Amino acid sequence: MKEPRIDRRIFLRGVGGVAAGITATSLTGCGTGTSRSAGAAAGGGGGKKTIVVRNSGGTYGDANLKAIYEPFTKETGITVKVVNIEYAQMLAQIKQGRPQFDVIDDSMADFVLFGKENALQKLDQDRLKNFKGAGIANNLVTPYAIGKNYWASVMAYRTDAFGGKTPQSWADFWDTKTFSGNRSLQSQDADLPELEFALLADGVPMDKLYPIDVDRAFKSLDRIKGSVKKYWDTGALPGVLLGRKEVVASSVWHGRLDALIKQGQPLAYQWNGARRQSNGWGIPNGAANTDAAYQLIDFSLRPSVQAHFATLYPMGPVVPAAYKQLPASVSANLASSPEHLKSGFDLDVDWWIKNQDAVIKRWRGWARG
Amino acid sequence: MAGSVLAPVPASTAPAAKSRVRRSLRSRRTRSGLLNGAPIVVYMLVLFVYPILSTLFLSVKGVHGGLTLHWYADALSGANLAVLLTTLRISAETSLISVVIGFLLAYAVSRLRPLWAGLVMLIIVVPHFISALVRTYGWIILLGDHGVVNSVLVDLHVPGAPFQLLYNEIGVIIGTTSVMLPYTVLLLYAVMRGVDRRLLAAAASMGAGRLVMFRRVYLPLVAPGLVNATVLSFILCLGYYLTPALMGGARQTVVAALIDDEVMKQNQWNGAAALGVILLVLTFAGLSLLRLARAIGASARQRGAA
């Protein structure tokens, strides 16, 4: 369901992507030119404008099509085409000078990496009518990118496992005496290790998480290690483990259990201590259709469009006004609702970009030891 | 050939060899053979020999150029060495268990009527066509704490049940063994079908008991198949990745997973290349072990004949 995760993985793979990027450039370079010119020819021939968007596809892509691209085409007459390529390939195309896409929908972390590679245009916020006064969080507005939709890693548990008690925090998750049973946490194969949860469990307040005290986090992880049955490496696994009673509590990408809960499985999310991340927009250097790219970004930031998207896909609006147009039942299930903004925290992309190599290496050794 | 190594070249050998080559080139059979072989040779050179050589080169290339054994030292020390030993242990356990079970299965099948034998072989092989991912999720349903196996054991009041059969080495071994089983069964079945039953009858007629018949007649006849099956499943296991990742825990990390990790996450191609070369060497070691076993078997047979 949460396809954005996939490009997170690829981003992790592509990190530093120098060597990989260079090899990819030489491989994909040839293909790029032709597809771009083919697209341009098709767009020019019909006398109609076309814009090419990169997203991660899947159900996330479908929701984007329905909530953003189709209404956008109806209003502006600009046709939206989609490509689903990954970080390394995008970077290779941009470096080659003629990317086949005009605007990128990707994780905010990827935009930091793109920024370091000088692959993106500086965003001119004056060209975004709906940006001014929209109240988008500061950490989602960078020189190169602007936030689009929130997602979150949250705690999930079996409601039938603790005799009516409810784990309220990561400290409860760590407390295997009161809340006995096996646990599952995310493996570094899936996304950034969950050091923040370990710190919250150890009593660090939510606003003092960064810079992460890595030693303290691992010491805290040591305490839960004996109860962790499996470190999940794919988004679907927490649902399987919880559903089969292999574990009674797990971290999970929010939204992944929705289908199981609808089927009546006794599962629930705990939003306290949720780790938020966001997708965003960016415009690559060499984009053929910058104007249309700004138009599309601007369109997507309308409160009504943001709200529409949230009803189709469980990712939260970045524009607070969108919540006025959402029924309470929908907002209760979104990472950026007013309550969840308080009960969770934002992942510090900059800290992780700086430290992830060392942390992941340590995490791997720790898990195997 | 040897002439070029020995200092005083006997004048006649080199031209003789050359003319022999020329003569054989002139024969039509050689020419058409070379012509037919050329595409596959080019194919192998481009897609097999070149990548392997470049992997070899990558594994000894230093960060700032130059040659180094640093990556091998890294691969053979600390946590990486532990992963390598885990891989070897899992492969050895898997190949032994799958050969033992495969032997019993293949023996049973070889005693069946052809129709039944075909049916049983189908049952053994068909699960192989199902996607590994689906099969592995099937194992979760079977082997989980509340899975079929543990539920039955608990209902039967087996002491100690439920057992943890997943996310540890037991889980991995169960998974990899099931993957290797079709290979060992097929291999052993073919060998067992080739055994001349009259030899057993002859042994029986000379008064050999069942055990002696099995040990002195049957086992030596199927021994080559046993060795082949063991080595084959060991080698296949060395590079196996999916099942240990899905059915094991963090402690059951295998070399293939480590390579994936180094390439995909850490962008560390040199270290991954070194690990790959080590796996390749281990595979070759397995194959030469096979050779050795065959040679010993052959010489033993010769001695027996003499």
Image (spheres, coloured by chain):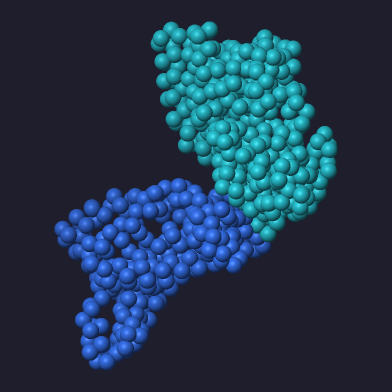
Q: Is residue B98 visible?
A: yes
Residue A69 % position (x, y) = 52, 16
The quarter of the picture where residue A252 lies is top right
Q: Which one is nearer the viewer's eye here, A359 or B212? A: B212
Quick one: which chain is blue?
B
Q: Is residue B252 above or below residue A338?
A: below
Q: Is residue A197 above or below residue B124?
A: above
Q: Colour of chain A?
A: cyan
Q: Is residue A298 visible?
A: no
Question: Residue at coordinates 83% horizontally, 43% vertically from top-left?
Answer: A203
Answer with left or right where residue A61 lies relative to residue B130: right
Q: Is residue A298 above or below residue B258?
A: above
Question: Residue at coordinates 31% horizontally, 61% vertically from top-left?
Answer: B120
The quarter of the picture where residue B117 lies is bottom left
Answer with left or right where residue A180 lies relative to residue B196: right
Residue A14 % position (x, y) = 59, 39
